[in-house]
Image (tube, helix red, strand yellow):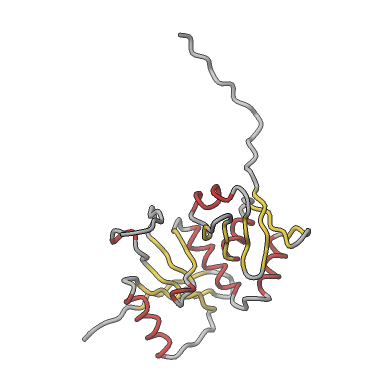
Amino acid sequence: MKRVKKEKTSEKETPKIINAEFAENKVIIWENYNEIYESGFYGKLRENRLELAVVEALLLLKRGKIKVFMGDKELDFKALFKEASKLDKRLAERYRVYEDLRERGLLVRTGFKFGCDFRVYERGVKLKKGPKSKKEHTKWIVFAVPEDYTCSFQELSRAVRLAHNIRARMLWAIVDNEGDCTYYQVLRMKP
């Protein structure tokens, strides 16, 4: 049998850009959403759609993976950020921390139901339902705050206890005025 060489084409394959809709405080993908979900466990799968948190949608939009529409109008990164900022005054810090954690190769999920900004898993973890190994559990819960943020000892204590209760570590992600993120881990110590 004779081998046939595949000819290389000079044209780059253009990545498929998926349409999404900005609705209330989330971005919804109605078709071809498995590609987005499976590429990095973005969003939350529902019956017939994928719901993205705004920070997830902003990153995917910036990376050219999705187009976002509000009604008939297409929103670029700046326009989506402006619209979403009306609903979330802390969006700048949350987005910057989300982007930084994703750039570090970490799996990041929203943490609203846990009372934090994000849940972060170790590199290489794939999400699954049911029993999990120790490595597959949330490793950190993250609170994103600006550098001039102040909190009470009670607030700090609640955050540490929350992390401890779900067998995770608590990180404060401090975003400075230049957009750089610095992470501080706070542990619960028993004397």
Q: Which residue is at 43% across, 67% downward?
A: 119
Give me the residue at 66% from left, 56% from top. 20
Q: Residue 170 falls in which quadrant of the image? A: bottom left
Residue 70's x, y, as percent?
Answer: 73, 62
Q: Is residue 150 above or below residue 144?
A: below
Q: Quadrant of residue 161?
A: bottom left
Towards the viewer: 150 or 1: 1
Quadrant, the C terminus: bottom left
Q: Give how far across and how far down residue 58 sits, in percent.
A: 62, 61
Compared across the picture, whether 117 is left or right of 79 comes to: left
Q: Residue at x 47, y 88 (%)?
A: 151
Taking 89 as reference, is 102 left or right? left
Residue ID at (68%, 54%): 67
For this orientation, the residue located farthest to the front is: 47
Q: Foreground residue, 139 or 43?
A: 43
Instruction: Give above or below for 18 relative to 56.
Output: above
Q: Nearer the viewer, residue 189 or 48?
A: 48
Picture quarter with the N terminus: top left
Question: Among all residues in the image, which is located at the extreme top?
Answer: 1
Return the x and y of residue 54 as percentages of the image width and height.
60, 66
